């Protein structure tokens, strides 16, 4: 072997620290700022994702009223594909109004049927997002950011075209995808318990 | 400087790879197996934590029946302190039967009041765990293990001393603490929606 | 409002548990097995990723010998794009043989130059992967799986066509991408210190 | 059963949304701000942990000079126990100056021996932290925060009492413990390669 590219240090070499580090110290210090990649989820990102969900609900309702179910369905598909994490294998989704044996909508098809109906495989779904929602607001009780996942719990209040307000108890869980976008991987929504 | 402990390589040293690695190759190879620390959450751990929650519910009921509320409360405190993550700052807990404005029990006191009652600060709590539960079973719809956190969604069916079965829609979220024990950091429980 | 789709419970409704859960209990229990998504990193996946890195190193050398630098470079690009995480913003990469002020190769271009040379922006790089490597073996001292990330530390021993063996101290850090593939986001390689 | 605490909704109940949500809407909205628990690692925390490591190194040297090895050892133990994560099972630690077969110090005892020497089980350790260090500075090339873990890579420059500066290539990996404190779970330090 003639090429001498790898230079492990022989056990016989003993250099003084002064000599060696003298040379090293003359090396110009790296002046550049450090590259920082921060994938931590921020509270602002979580609140933004919540607002986006609310806006999407109203948008689907508006699209339905103006352009019909097919247009609303197309929008709902885009929303699901960008805001939920079904491509990860499953989403833990318990919508507000589903019933057994189709309570849990762990597949994309089940989520889409819930939001816009029209799927014979989910015969009880009439399209939650088509009910003429005009407003949607979030009131968090708590937000827990574990660093690379975040969960929220609180109320969501949605208003229909008559001004009726429905309050639901809502839990969302988020993770970031490779592109840095929060995706819903957990969604449990329920009507408040009415005590005695 | 007389001590020559640090030996950075001078820029003038050029050794042949053959010579240097010849020496290195004679070093006895590390024979030991690698130390492996695996903090990943397993499915078995998740299912075990669910069973432990069910067992604790029945145990608190049994303790209440046999030994009274004070004993049940003491047990409930031990369960909360070992199975939930309140020491992390908050738990996102929406119990089955709470109502506004105390729906969400993000503090340990709120959880304890829900399970065993007797706290004037939570006047509507009569003690969910004191209702004579004799059995508790979990039927998961989905389990999502992100690696260092896990969430489950599905039904929990609890049976009282008369044989009545109550089914709830249940979401749990877990993380591991420093000791490697799963702790509940998210718990959303709701009665099934009753469709129209 | 005529449509009666949402049915929150009025505060005036009081049903007996026996009556209500009697109905619920008749609901057929969900028979299906739970959907399980497990993104935890396993030890087998980590060891597989290490073997894949070793194989890629040998493959690039072999390709270089048979088909020249351009072919080796094309292969190295595929390796970097599939095995490293540069698309996340940066990789913390300290190759074995780099020197200041280009010691750290946090960009894809810097990694490619290190492996196959030929980049005027990295004039000291002669192509580490082109040195005729014929074998590469990993001896881990420790593996730490945090759940959604994993790190390894130990020796990697690489053999050239003359049979010379070079041992390096190697740390790798991995995360999973959206597709579930481990990617190197940290790589610190250094020649062993030669003591006094 | 006379106690009527659980009130699942009967399938025969159909209430108008207007009536029901009218009642709900009158419920006073939760006014309190959300509880926010944020366990994400911040860049400031990482930089702080690095500065703390540097300060601890100088402190151990100073303590050694003033009070002797026993005092330095006691301080080093406190530093290791508070700044490293050995209690998690192992730390991936490759110190600057260790040699085979004791290159990797995955145990607390191995780390302590490296820093302060005096352990017959690690006969080549003379105590890296006892070498009279008077200054320690970090120059990061890159910082990668995954959310619940963080890694840094760059140079650390340490100065002894004669003013000699030694530069090392340094990788640190951190996670947060239950108390929210960053702990080093990965530490790979190496002298710069000296090119040909």
Image (tube, coloured by chain):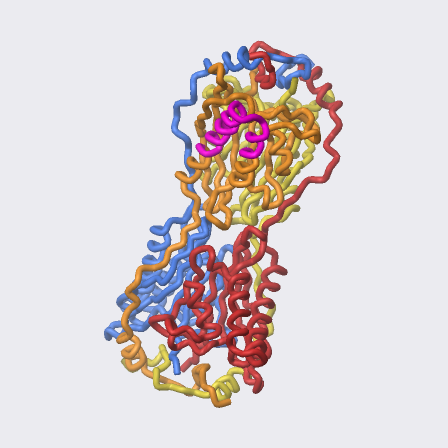
Chain colours: A yellow, B orange, C blue, D red
- Residue at (38%, 49%) from the top-left corner? C42
Q: Reply above or below: B63 against C82.
A: above
**Residue nearest the viewer, comparing B33 with A99:** B33
Magenta region's main secondary structure?
helix
Identify the magenta region: B51-76
At which x and y percent is residue B1? 51, 89
Apparent side of residue A6 relative to residue B169 in the rendered image (left or right) = left
Q: Reply above or below: B42 against B23.
A: above
Q: Is-magenta flag for residue D62?
A: no
Determine the image quadrant of residue A194: top right
At which x and y percent is residue A60? 62, 29
Quadrant of the frame with the N terminus of chain D: top right
Q: Residue furthest front?
A: B67
Q: Is-magenta flag for residue B59?
A: yes
**Residue nearest the viewer, comparing D60 with C182:** D60
Quadrant of the frame with the C terminus of chain D: bottom left
- Residue at (67%, 30%) from the top-left corner? B119
Q: Reply above or below: D62 against A107.
A: below
At which x and y percent is residue B120? 70, 29
Q: Would residue A105 be visible to someone looking at this image?
A: no
- Residue at (43%, 87%) from the top-left corner? A15
């Amino acid at each position: 072997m003639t090429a001498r590219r790898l230079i492990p240090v022989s056990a016989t070499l003993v250099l003084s620290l002064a000599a060696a580090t003298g040379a090293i110290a003359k090396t110009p210090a790296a002046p550049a700022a450090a590259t920082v990649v921060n994938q931590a989820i921020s509270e602002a990102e979580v609140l933004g994702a919540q607002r986006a969900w609310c806006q999407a609900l109203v948008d689907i309702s508006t699209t339905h009223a103006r352009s019909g179910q097919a247009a609303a369905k197309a929008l709902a598909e885009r929303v699901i594909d960008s805001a939920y994490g079904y491509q990860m294998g499953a989403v833990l989704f318990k919508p507000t109004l589903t019933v057994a044996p189709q309570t849990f909508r762990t597949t994309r098809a089940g989520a889409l049927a819930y939001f816009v109906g029209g799927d014979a495989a989910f015969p009880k779904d009439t399209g939650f997002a088509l009910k003429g929602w005009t407003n949607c607001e979030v009131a968090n009780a708590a937000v827990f950011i574990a660093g690379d996942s975040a969960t929220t719990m609180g109320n969501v209040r949605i208003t229909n075209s008559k001004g009726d307000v429905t309050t639901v108890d809502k839990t969302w869980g988020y993770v970031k995808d490779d592109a840095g976008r929060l995706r819903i991987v957990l969604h449990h929504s329920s009507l408040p318990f009415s005590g005695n």
